[in-house]
Amino acid sequence: MSPGVTMGRLGKGSEMQRKVLIAATLAILVATAVWVAAALAGVPGGTASAPVDVTNDVYANNEESLGMSPDGQLLAGAWNDWEFNDGCGLSFSTDGGGHWASESFAPFTAFSNTPGVDPILPTQFAIAGDPAVVYNPKSSKFDVICQAFGTKTGNQIQLLSTTFDPKKADPTANVNLSYGAAAWSPLEPVTTGTSNGSQKGSNGKLPDHEAVTVDTGTGPGHHFGRLFVAWAEFSGFGRSPIDIAYSDDEGLHWAGPIRISDKGNQFDQDAIPRVGPDGTVYVSWVSGPNEKSLKNNVAMIDKSSDGGATWGSDQVAARIVSPIGGLLPNSNYRVFEDVHSTVDQQSGRIVLTFTDQKDGASNIYATHNLTAGDITQWSTPTAVKSSGEEEFFPWMSSAPDGRVDLVFYDRSCDPAGDKLNCVTLASTADDGASWGYTTLLPTGFDGDLHHACLAPDDPEACGRNFLGDYIAVASTDGKAQALWTGNGGQGMDVFSGRATFGP
């Protein structure tokens, strides 16, 4: 629209209107100039939406995962749901995250959220958690994987996969109906282990803290629609190497488990699979000299050039000088180094982040490989947003246009107390050389205000402070959508927010 033409239509007697319009036009031009200047400088700036309380219930929800369609309109979120079913909570949105269906849960558990009411799909597992969800453009469905514990006949644990079809989902269904049986495919095991049936991850031989990705490329080197899931395989003897499996039919059949960790690297966690623009598959993780070490920890990475079938030698992407572990300062919940990564879909370079407290408070540091495809040489890690307050739980995603997004909890909004958590989105268009910031949650919340209940019907089990171990983000060219845990009116709820990009 031309400002001159618009003002000419106002007529001679509209001096006030002309002034208002001129002021508005100048404001738009200034805002556009600022955005363009930031973009040219490699620092994307976003506009934040108002946060939406997705769950808004009594019991705690944490450890979110998020899948999003390429147009950014169709979303599915999953999380640990500490209600009566003690399973994987789930909701979906068809309008880009503005509104969400009333929360329900994925059908991995043998119980519903109402004692005495059978779940929609019978299952033998008593507990489920560590959800992972991703949108698969090959089927236009969401692939959902959860860790399920405790059978009726023994202490089994499995990674179970299913698909969720929002086109067949009933958003008005009762919470116990999981949006209807038609929305789900049968559960299929990815891998099976044993445990004592509890939620303490290091007991027994079991897969833990899985993460997923889908190959969305269609060119040479790609396997369009291939679903990857990576995890730490606890051995029962204090070791936890990294494994991966993949499926070309959305979990009906699986190749794997395939061992990624070299024999010398066996104390690992936080496996994150990602696919580059040429089809190369990368997995990053944190590795230490033993299961509980807070010394000599490193961010490790490996790659596969044949769609995940075979892997090379593990490489160190960064050394973590002062790893963070145990309780977060001024809080009663735990944090870790939380190594994470994604791939710039234009340059092909990997951007990797981790938490380090080498300069005082735990801050998030970023590095990138110097040459696309080469995982042996990396840039010097630098702070994403240098702060004297705590930063933690980084999670990353990448947009097709080359923008890389990083969401994390950020206490710089509480410099006096270093206790309240805000949520920041950091974005880069130059693989971490410079960052722009969007505040998704400007008012901090106290993570110790509400408890996570191990058993809602047992008051003694509701005295545990646990914010989870991660949050989530997914990206398109136009926006970054995030999920995080925050304080609702009654308990810890899942919140959704987004940053939009462009003039």
Image (tube, grey):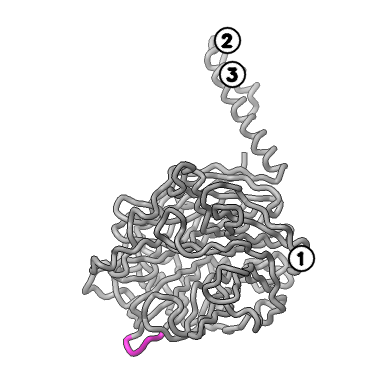
Task: Tell me the residue at 72%/57% (across/down).
Answer: 380
- Residue picked out by circle 1: 377
Identify residue type, mark 2: Lys
Circle 3: is it few (<14), some (14-19), or many (20+) Cα within 10 Å?
few
Boundaries of the magenta span: 152-156
Q: Earlier in the sequence, mark 1 or mark 2?
A: 2
**Quarter of the N terminus within the rendering:** top right
Q: Earlier in the sequence, mark 1 or mark 3?
A: 3
Q: Nearer the viewer, residue 477 or 261?
A: 261
Q: Position of residue 253 (x, y in %)?
A: 54, 83
Identify residue type, mark 1: Gln
- Residue picked out by circle 2: 12
Q: Is residue 146 above or below residue 368?
A: below
Task: Tell me the residue at 40%/86% (across/down).
Answer: 156
Identify residue type, mark 3: Arg
Q: Is residue 439 above or below residue 79?
A: above
Describe the element under mark 3 as helix, strand or loop. loop
Q: Position of residue 149 (x, y in %)?
A: 39, 79
